[in-house]
Amino acid sequence: MKQIFVGNLNFGITEEDDLKRLFASFGEITEAKIITDARSYCSKGYGFITFARAEDAAAALAGMNGKIVLGRPLRLGEATGAPYSRSRRAREPLGEHGGT
């Protein structure tokens, strides 16, 4: 699996299925996530797409980076750090001695 960052999204793109549809022609998408503000639930203008195959992610990067979608040029890049996932759980609390 390979995850890519999708930036400069139009704030009108609020449904993850819409984001999936933008990239569906490049291959199997296992997850799409639009990052929202915790208080207002409004889009922050970026998200992540996870492809089943790294080759599909590379094709999406090449084909969609800079493409104008709803008046804004998309900014794509390889996601760095820990992959974003709905299944990622909050960290366990530290022990009574702060984990030491």
Image (spheres, helix red, strand yellow):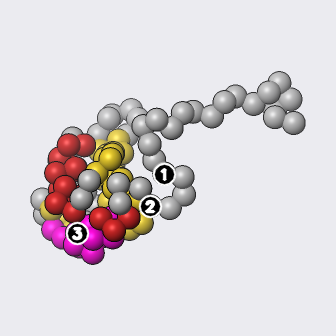
- The CA span between labels 2 and 1 is 7 Å
Give x and y (percent) for residue 22.
17, 56
Mark 2 lies on residue: 79
User: Residue at 42% across / 66% down in the picture?
Assistant: 78
| Res 76 seen here | no
| Res 93 seen here | yes
Front one among 46 and 50: 50
Q: Are marks 1 and 3 in contact (CB under 8 Å)?
A: no
Q: What residue range appears in magenta?
A: 57-68
59 up-or-down from 98: above or below: below
- The CA span between labels 2 and 3 is 15 Å
Residue extending farthest to the top is 96
Mark 1 lies on residue: 83
Kindly identify the amino acid type of the residue bearing the numbered disc 3: Met
Q: Which mark is residue 64?
A: 3
Give x and y (percent) for residue 23.
21, 58
Q: Main secondary structure of the magenta part?
A: helix
51 sits left or right of 9 in the view: right
- The CA span between labels 1 and 3 is 20 Å
Is residue 100 covered in magenta?
A: no
Q: Are marks 2 and 1 in contact (CB under 8 Å)?
A: yes
97 sits left or right of 7 in the view: right
Q: Earlier in the sequence, mark 2 or mark 3?
A: 3
53 up-or-down from 86: above or below: below
For numbered disc 2, what is the local secondary structure?
loop
Give x and y (percent) for residue 91.
63, 34
Is residue 63 covered in magenta?
A: yes
Kindly identify the amino acid type of the residue bearing the numbered disc 2: Ala
Front one among 78 and 30: 30
Classed neighbour count for the residue bearing mark 2: other residues with Cα under 10 Å, few (<14), some (14–19), many (≥20): some
Quarter of the picture containing the C terminus is top right
